[in-house]
């Protein structure tokens, strides 16, 4: 009996890549085309559209290996991700912003770091537009082609390097399905966005998982400025969610994450788990 292994040309467990969209079609197209170009692993796309009006939904429906969730109302980042979790079939899950551009071997290297040690719970990359402990600034490139070349060289030079951090940015994070089975999804009190990634980071650490930056992965992030969103409104949301976040964790500063995690341990499902 012959077994046909052709479809397993690159055997990897299934990875669910979750992307949320709300307009910004040119960014989404560039992001998704970079995924198809640079991802050899076995992946599915779970695309959650939060009420786009610019043709995004029509575009998403044309994509292979993908599942599209179309929301009439904007469910925010946490709400959309939580919806996507219920559809994700992968052993690993990636949350990825739609205004990012991924690079050669990005997923392979993120997985390598995630699987390096069972104590590692979430891994994030380096980027140009991200929290300071993941940032490489100023960006040493002017065009996307130069960016790809830089990312490639950076990956070779920093091969398999990584370091632990207190929180990770939600612009790109990878974790095992078992993590959300343990700690739950993203806290929707932080809808439409900001601080839900920090909250998720804290709950992962309370459940005894480490947060890790893959120093050999660089991805480009255009950043919210690209969406020409209302700055005043954005700042208002950030301030409100910061207040909610500090209130929830009885903190006054992000420097207190370590002690907060120690104080909250062990992970108590009735207190720390967020249903999704």
Image (tube, grey):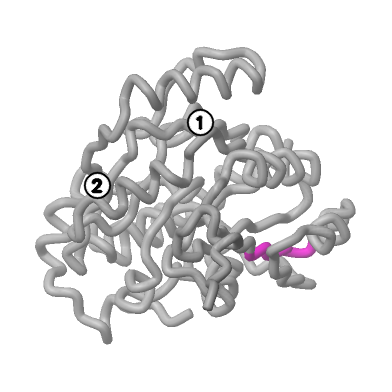
Work out whether 182 lies above or below 7: below
User: Which one is in front, 157 or 267?
Assistant: 157
Where residue 11 is drawn, which disc sits there? none
Q: What crowding class fits label 2: few (fewer than 14 Cα within 10 Å), some (14-19), or many (20 or more)? A: some
Q: Nearer the viewer, residue 255 or 182?
A: 182
The percent coordinates of residue 137 (x first, y second) are 44, 19
Residue 276 on image: x %, y %: 48, 79
Front one among 248 and 147: 147
Q: Residue at x 35, y 60 (%)?
A: 199
Tell me which secondary structure the magenta stretch mostly adopts: strand
Vertical order, 61 against 158 (above or below): below
Crowdedness of circle 1 by 10 Å Cα count: few (<14), some, many (20+)? many
Residue located beneath label 2 in the image: 166
Q: Where does residue 249 sit, x and y in percent of width and height?
A: 26, 63
Q: Say if 275 sits above or below 2 in the image.
A: below
Element under disc 2: loop
């Amino acid at each position: 009996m012959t077994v046909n292994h052709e479809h397993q040309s690159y055997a990897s467990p299934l990875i669910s890549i979750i992307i949320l969209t709300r307009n910004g079609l040119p960014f989404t197209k560039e992001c998704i085309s970079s995924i198809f170009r640079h991802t050899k692993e076995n992946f599915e796309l779970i695309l959650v559209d939060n009420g786009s009006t610019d043709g995004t939904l029509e575009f998403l429906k044309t994509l292979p290996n993908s599942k599209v969730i179309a929301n009439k109302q904007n469910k925010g980042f946490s709400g959309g991700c939580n919806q996507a979790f219920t559809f994700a079939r992968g052993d690993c899950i990636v949350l990825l912003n739609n205004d990012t551009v991924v690079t050669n071997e990005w997923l392979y290297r993120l997985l390598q770091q995630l699987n390096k040690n069972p104590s590692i719970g979430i891994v994030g990359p380096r980027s140009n537009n991200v929290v300071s402990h993941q940032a490489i600034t100023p960006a040493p490139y002017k065009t996307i082609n130069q960016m790809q070349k830089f990312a490639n060289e950076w990956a070779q030079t920093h091969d398999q390097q990584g370091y632990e951090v207190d929180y990770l940015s939600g612009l790109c994070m990878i974790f095992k399905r078992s993590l959300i089975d343990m700690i739950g999804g993203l806290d929707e009190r932080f809808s439409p966005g900001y601080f839900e990634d920090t909250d998720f980071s804290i709950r992962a650490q309370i459940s005894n998982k480490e947060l890790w930056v893959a120093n050999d992965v660089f991805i480009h992030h255009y950043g919210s400025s690209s969406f020409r969103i209302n700055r005043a409104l954005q700042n208002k949301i950030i301030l409100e969610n910061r207040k909610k976040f500090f209130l929830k964790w009885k903190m006054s500063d992000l420097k207190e994450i370590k002690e907060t995690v120690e104080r909250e341990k062990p992970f108590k499902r009735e207190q720390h788990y967020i249903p999704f």
